[in-house]
């Protein structure tokens, strides 16, 4: 699918040419030591960089955004990438000024150079249509410094920012290997995934999860939708159950009250395909205590699935051909209340085709040592969830547009 709609590395012919390579190296940084805590995104981009080893690779990427404590320069990112690549990575503290131009002009085939955090430029923080993004100074200048553009930044694919959607309008472009893998694997969920298809939607991003549930249920993509975490609390409330004051207040604080009504409509139309937990766990006097959902205590927050629910849901997951897992089942940071998340992930890891939506869930999978048992762990939580709602990601749309313009 992707090879016909989007340019690929194989179709570009990049040897001996200057390639602008958009990566997403945005990573957690320790506020005390200022060191990068997780290099997963770096490692995922290595195959694309290696595939361009006969080119002059100019990396454009970002770290955080204005106003955040971890909004910083990319000097340590260049050092981290250099360590993982086992070859030099030149860092330039400039984006498209004379310093950057001179450094690119001095490059030889096989060189890798990283420009400064593109979000240091105010234009990159704008959300613009591709046509307007192409007119920005950052895009006009960067596009004049290279022969081709390769976008490997799936984690940023849902953001219509200038380097993501504007550069493909100005240059012959292609998807990097990670972008290609993400799009082709996630597309398989919609077309040709082994049946039955089970979606496990949890965590706290209720609006996104409800959108995914609506899309996959209405279009027959999923045979079952299992709801866990805060998403489950919304559906339990929609089903008319009392979830207790703290859990209801959390939904209100997160501004997801409207999602209760949408969940109610989904339950009315797809009650036989939406699976709610039957039991939950709370903390009472410092200990884990479990209750059926019909008798949730009024004053204690729901922190995990109960064991009876875990048994039922792991059986449901284990019988699936495909599982898409996005979001934890409870307060997984506490061992006592990580039981549900861990048990469901173990079950998901055993099925034929298993996809994780990234974010916190991916971190738990790595901690459990299950990463090699999953078919695919997405590098972009927000991009992945938006893709699963059936929307065309701005980055993918721009690459498709580039192919129509430049071939």
Image (spheres, rainbow, N blue to C red):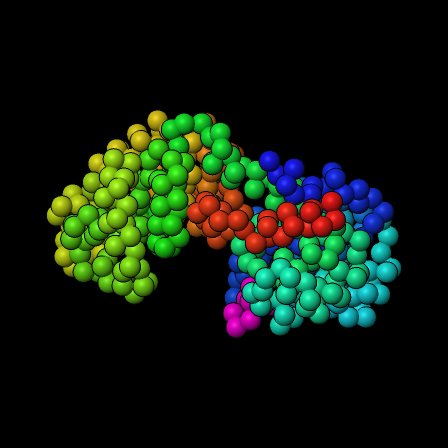
78 left or right of 271 in image = right
336 left or right of 394 in image = left
**Name of the residue lying farthest toward the left:** 295
- In the displayed structure, 135 sits above or below 323; it is below
Q: What quarter of the picture does the C terminus occupy?
A: top right
Q: Find residue 260 and report its horizontal and vertical position in percent.
A: 26, 54
Q: Quadrant of residue 205?
A: bottom left
The magenta stretch spans residue 68: yes
Which residues make up the magenta segment?
63-72
Q: What quarter of the picture does the N terminus occupy?
A: top right
20 left or right of 133 in image = right
Residue displayed at 36% across by 45% down: 213
Q: Find residue 49 and report its horizontal and vertical position in percent.
A: 71, 46
Residue displayed at 81% across by 70% down: 98
**In this rendering, does residue 303 appear at all?**
no
- In the displayed structure, 325 sits above or below 160; it is above
Q: Quadrant of residue 124?
A: bottom right
- In the displayed structure, 143 sits above or below 337; it is below
**In this rendering, does residue 308 appear at all?**
yes
Q: Find residue 267 and report its horizontal and vertical position in percent.
A: 25, 44
Residue displayed at 56% across by 65% down: 127
Main SS, magenta residues: loop
Q: Find residue 157 and report its horizontal and vertical position in percent.
A: 57, 53
């Amino acid at each position: 699918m992707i090879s016909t709609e989007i340019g690929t590395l194989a179709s570009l012919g990049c040897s001996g040419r200057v390639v602008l390579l958009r990566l997403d190296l945005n990573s957690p940084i320790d506020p005390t030591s200022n060191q990068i805590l997780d290099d997963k995104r770096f490692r995922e981009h290595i195959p694309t960089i290696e595939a361009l080893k006969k080119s002059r690779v100019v990396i454009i990427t970002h770290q955080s955004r204005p106003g955040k404590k971890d909004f910083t320069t990319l000097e340590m990112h260049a050092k981290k990438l250099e360590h993982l690549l086992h070859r030099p990575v030149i860092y330039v503290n400039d984006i498209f000024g004379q310093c950057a131009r001179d450094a690119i002009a001095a490059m030889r085939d096989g060189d890798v150079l990283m420009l400064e955090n593109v979000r240091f430029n105010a234009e990159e923080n704008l959300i613009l249509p591709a046509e307007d993004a192409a007119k920005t100074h950052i895009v006009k200048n960067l596009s004049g410094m290279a022969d081709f553009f390769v976008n490997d930044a799936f984690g940023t694919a849902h953001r219509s920012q200038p380097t993501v959607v504007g550069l493909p309008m100005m240059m012959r472009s292609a998807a990097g290997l990670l972008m290609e893998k993400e799009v082709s694997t996630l597309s398989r969920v919609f077309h040709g995934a082994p049946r039955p298809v089970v979606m496990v939607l949890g965590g706290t991003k209720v609006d996104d999860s409800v959108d995914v549930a609506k899309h996959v249920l209405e279009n027959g993509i999923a045979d079952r939708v299992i709801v866990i975490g805060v998403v489950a609390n919304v559906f339990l409330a929609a089903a008319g159950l009392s979830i207790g004051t703290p859990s209801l207040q959390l939904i209100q604080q997160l501004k997801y009250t409207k999602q209760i009504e949408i969940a109610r409509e989904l339950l009315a139309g797809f009650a036989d395909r939406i699976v709610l937990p039957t039991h939950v766990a709370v903390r009472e006097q410092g200990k884990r205590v479990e209750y059926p959902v019909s008798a949730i205590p009024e004053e204690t927050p729901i922190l995990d699935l109960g064991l009876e629910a875990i048994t039922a849901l792991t059986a449901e997951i284990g019988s699936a051909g495909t599982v898409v897992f996005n979001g934890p089942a409870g307060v997984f940071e506490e061992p006592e209340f990580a039981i549900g998340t861990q048990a469901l992930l173990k079950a998901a890891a055993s099925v034929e085709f298993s996809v994780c939506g990234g974010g916190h869930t991916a971190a738990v999978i790595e901690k459990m040592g299950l990463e090699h048992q999953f078919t695919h762990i997405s590098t972009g939580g927000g991009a992945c969830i938006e893709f699963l709602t059936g929307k065309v990601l701005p980055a993918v749309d721009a690459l498709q547009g580039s192919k129509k313009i430049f071939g």
